[in-house]
Amino acid sequence: MNRLRSFAHAHALGLAISTLFVGAAGAASPGNDPAALAKIRDTAMASDYAWERMADMTDLIGPRLSGSRGAAAAVTQVADAMRKLGAKVTLQPVKVPHWVRGVETGELVEYRGRPEGISQRVVLTALGGSGATPAEGLVAQVIVVSSFDELKARAGEVKGRIVLFDVPFDQGMADRGLAGQAYGQGSNYRTNGPRIAAEMGAAAALVRSVGGANYRLPHTGNTGLQDGARIPAAAVTVEDAMLMRRLAKRGPITMRLVLTPQNLPDTDSYNVIADWPGTDKAGEVVIVSGHLDSWDLSTGAHDDASGVASAMAVFDTLKKLDYRPRRTIRMIAWMNEENGTRGARTYLAANEANAASHIGAIESDNGAGRPFGLRASVPATSSRLFAPLQAALQPIGAGLFRREDALSTGDLSGLERAGVPSFAPLLDTSTYFDYHHTAADTLDKVDPDHLRRHVAVMAATAWFLANVEEPIGRASVPPR
């Protein structure tokens, strides 16, 4: 006899069944019963709700950089969809940066061996927070370096010149499950290189694009540039970085660079917060989330429409089953992850005092590759508690559980430092950085079956955390 039948039998006898609860809508909720977890998994696997919401976001809106009309439209679209599911929706005000891309061109106008009348175009794209050149551009020599140590060793050559950080993305690491680490190595130069070059007097900074699939496609991203030292900064394609290194070995090279972005005053936006109320522990919260903004080069399907849509689909799955959790499940579509994390910081400021009421927080922000399981920043002694969840996800090949001291995901890192355990799908990211922050990050790059598995992992995990009996413990990440 299954648990629901047991409940009906016990109710007829006037007995209490401790593992079953009555939801706000009067529906019986079977806690973390294996059959319930399996139903959540199977319901998610049979639905295209996440795909439909992702198509709405990418095909109907397009790019969603913070401060843009696209970002504002996405707030409205997601809020309306969550209200339609019956969730309690709150729009949390957030002040966000408003950076607007302008003209962006590069041309090599002098180099040893250049035939008369010949110049070479460099394919590039401005980096977030970049300063602007004069409208007619700037012309300066380029120095090519492969590390910060080399830059410091050549400090006397930097002033008034364009610095190119030519640091390859390690695709071999990505192919072997270490894509995040490979990206971290490269993005260090994108984030910090322009700032350091500015401090040393450079006229502009370029970085070799951080990612794979070298088809002369530039990868954008944010920088650490600040007002007062906001030099022009751009990412060049891998092929053009390699070209400039080869030419630099022959002799001096000179570039004409035109970048005309604008750093406008901060503007108003919102985190979209939707609650699926709990029953007897409604004051305790489990977050399931993705970030709503994207870079402006593409429609941001992998980064991060897939994450937001999967988080939204958790509520759709529970509604189809008429399941009500013990704890409140909170869907958050974070604003401004890409160039400021203002949404995450705003939420943390409003909730840090009651961080203890947050039992766990899930974020998907590593694309929509096939999931193999779950990453979690829980105490080592708590890993055993997740065996039922692993068992429920094993039939779809997602039963792995990897405990880490800290996930340090962009939007959850503050909550994690406040003690809230973080969770994320354990994904195949070997090709994620082929599309990440490029014009190629579009809907057609997402596999619908992988996305359904993604939803199954997030929905089952959110439900499990919302109903787990034994405390899972707190994250223990040292404060910054």
Image (spheres, rainbow, N blue to C red):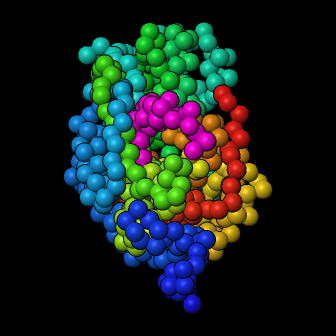
Can see residue 185?
A: no
Q: Nearer the viewer, residue 215 or 393?
A: 393
Where is residue 294 drawn, in percent x and y? 36, 42
Q: Residue furthest bottom?
A: 1
Look at the image and tell me in which quarter the N terminus lies: bottom right
Q: Residue furthest front?
A: 14
Q: Is residue 209 magenta?
A: no
Residue drawn at (33%, 66%), measured in percent from left and top? 49
Q: Is residue 351 magenta?
A: yes
Q: Residue furthest right?
A: 381
Q: Is residue 416 above or below residue 308?
A: above
Residue drawn at (52%, 19%), measured in percent from left and top? 195
Residue drawn at (50%, 85%), measured in percent from left and top? 12
Is 13 displayed left or right of 341 in the figure? right
Q: Is residue 112 above or below residue 76?
A: above
Residue drawn at (51%, 48%), measured in percent from left and top? 283
Where is residue 380 drawn, in percent x and y? 76, 54
Which quadrant holds residue 468?
A: bottom right
Q: Nearer the viewer, residue 79 or 292?
A: 79
Q: Is residue 117 above or below residue 393?
A: above
**So how many labels did they put on this image?**
0
Q: Nearer the viewer, residue 143 or 321?
A: 321
Q: Is residue 83 above or below residue 118?
A: below
The magenta region covers 331-357
Look at the image and tell me in which quarter the C terminus lies: top right
Where is residue 442 drawn, in percent x and y? 33, 54
Where is residue 26 drawn, in percent x and y? 40, 69
Can see residue 90?
A: yes
Is 202 displayed left or right of 335 in the figure? right
